[in-house]
């Protein structure tokens, strides 16, 4: 009996390692899917952000510069947001409600512009518009007004989201600040590998998209605050438009399309010429953005535009807005795993 059981013992560690590897992939799949199903995506993103901020303060992978102890760095990441929130509440009461009111007014303004497009266009051009477009105008105007009404409940949702993000920051900071376990259990080791690859994908996508969103917002601010006033044109709701350009710009491709539509429609509300100028400006900016995408996003992730569009379409169809936001990150993570395995 002892001789018959001896041959199977050397294969036991290999079988256990394979099981741990597949189990880690299964747990990662459940985690990524669960965050979308239960609306926990902001928390997951905040975990990655908290981890990266704490690791940066610790000086991970850096031989020079200021370096903090892990527990001190974690404490800073945990406490600084609380201090910032207290200062904000003490000195900027009503700012959030004012911002919500501004975006509500912007949406109502855009809805009115949609209904008045035929009146704003030159008569010879407006006469060629099909009558069927009236139904589309009415639908779009009603949709914009419904979104404006939906912003009324943004305060409660924003409070819940902020709490979720803060908890995620705390978890991410504590992952770095807490001493790592010396255990070399196979599942723990494989789960750590999955987490490293996921955070690496997060770093690639977020850093790249952050620069692109900043570039878009800066160019939009120059266009609205400098270029148009030089010609005596004053665009309404400049502040909300610039902020929307940055926030929506964090979502690849689709966010830019959203900003394009809003900015062009806001220009049409002033005059058709301003709307056309806004559209030309956006086309020029996007040509420059293609270069940035190729240099930044393409180089960091090796992902082309059609790949992003495909996964974002599928993510939005299955999980809604959360799937739309998470799709680039999840796809970058899957691609990272495939690259490590030597499959792509």
Image (spheres, helix red, strand yellow):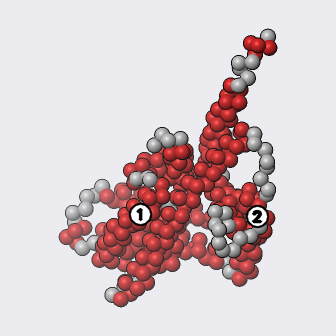
Residue at screen point 64% across, 46% down? 193
The quadrant in which the N terminus is found is: top right
Task: State the image coordinates of residue 67 (x, y, percent, origin top left).
Answer: 71, 71
Compared across the picture, whether 95 is left or right of 328 comes to right
In the picture, the disc for residue 295 is 1
Q: Position of residue 174 (x, y in %)?
A: 76, 59
Secondary structure under the numbered disc 1 in the rendered image:
helix
Residue 295 visible, this orientation = yes
Crowd class of label 1 (few under 14; some 14 to 19; many from 20; radius 10 Å): few
Position of 240 compared to 229: left or right?
Answer: right
SS at badge 2? helix
Q: CA distance from mark 1 to mark 2?
A: 33 Å
Q: Earlier in the sequence, mark 1 or mark 2?
A: 2
Question: Going 67% across and 63% down the picture, which residue do you hit?
Answer: 60
Q: Is residue 239 above or below residue 157?
A: below
- The residue tagged 2 is 70
Residue 318 visible in this rendered orientation of the protein: no
| Residue drawn 43% across the image and 84% down it | 225
Which of the 4 image quarters holds residue 49? bottom right
- Identify the residue at horizontal 76%, vertical 64% (top origin): 70
Q: Is residue 248 left or right of residue 228?
A: right
């Amino acid at each position: 009996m002892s001789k018959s059981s001896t041959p199977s013992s050397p294969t036991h560690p290999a079988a256990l390692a394979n099981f741990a590897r597949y189990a880690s992939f299964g747990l990662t799949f459940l985690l990524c899917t669960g965050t979308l199903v239960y609306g926990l995506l902001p928390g997951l993103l905040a975990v990655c952000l908290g981890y990266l901020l704490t690791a940066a303060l610790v000086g991970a992978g850096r031989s020079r510069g200021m370096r903090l102890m892990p527990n001190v760095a974690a404490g800073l990441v945990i406490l600084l947001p609380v201090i910032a929130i207290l200062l904000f509440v003490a000195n900027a009461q009503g700012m959030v409600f004012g911002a919500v009111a501004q975006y509500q007014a912007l949406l109502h303004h855009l809805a009115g512009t949609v209904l008045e497009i035929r009146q704003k266009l030159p008569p010879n051009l407006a006469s060629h518009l099909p009558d069927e477009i009236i139904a589309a105008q009415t639908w779009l105007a009603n949709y914009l007004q419904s979104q404006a009404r939906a912003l009324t409940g943004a305060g409660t949702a924003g409070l819940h989201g902020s709490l979720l993000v803060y908890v995620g920051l705390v978890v991410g900071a504590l992952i770095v600040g807490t001493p790592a376990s010396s255990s070399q259990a196979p599942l723990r080791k494989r789960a750590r590998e999955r987490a490293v690859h996921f955070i690496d994908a997060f770093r690639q996508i977020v850093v790249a998209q952050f620069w692109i969103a900043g570039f878009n917002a800066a160019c939009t601010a120059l266009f609205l605050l400098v270029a148009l006033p030089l010609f005596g044109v004053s665009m309404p709701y400049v502040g909300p438009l610039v902020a929307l350009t940055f926030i929506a710009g964090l979502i690849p491709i689709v966010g830019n399309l959203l900003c394009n539509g809003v900015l062009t429609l806001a220009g049409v509300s002033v005059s058709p010429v301003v709307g056309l100028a806004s559209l030309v400006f956006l086309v020029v900016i996007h040509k420059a953005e293609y270069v940035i995408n190729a240099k930044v996003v393409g180089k960091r992730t090796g992902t082309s535009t059609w790949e992003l569009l495909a996964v974002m379409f599928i993510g939005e169809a299955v999980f809604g807005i959360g799937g739309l936001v998470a799709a680039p990150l999840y796809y970058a993570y899957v691609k990272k795993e495939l690259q490590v395995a030597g499959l792509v």
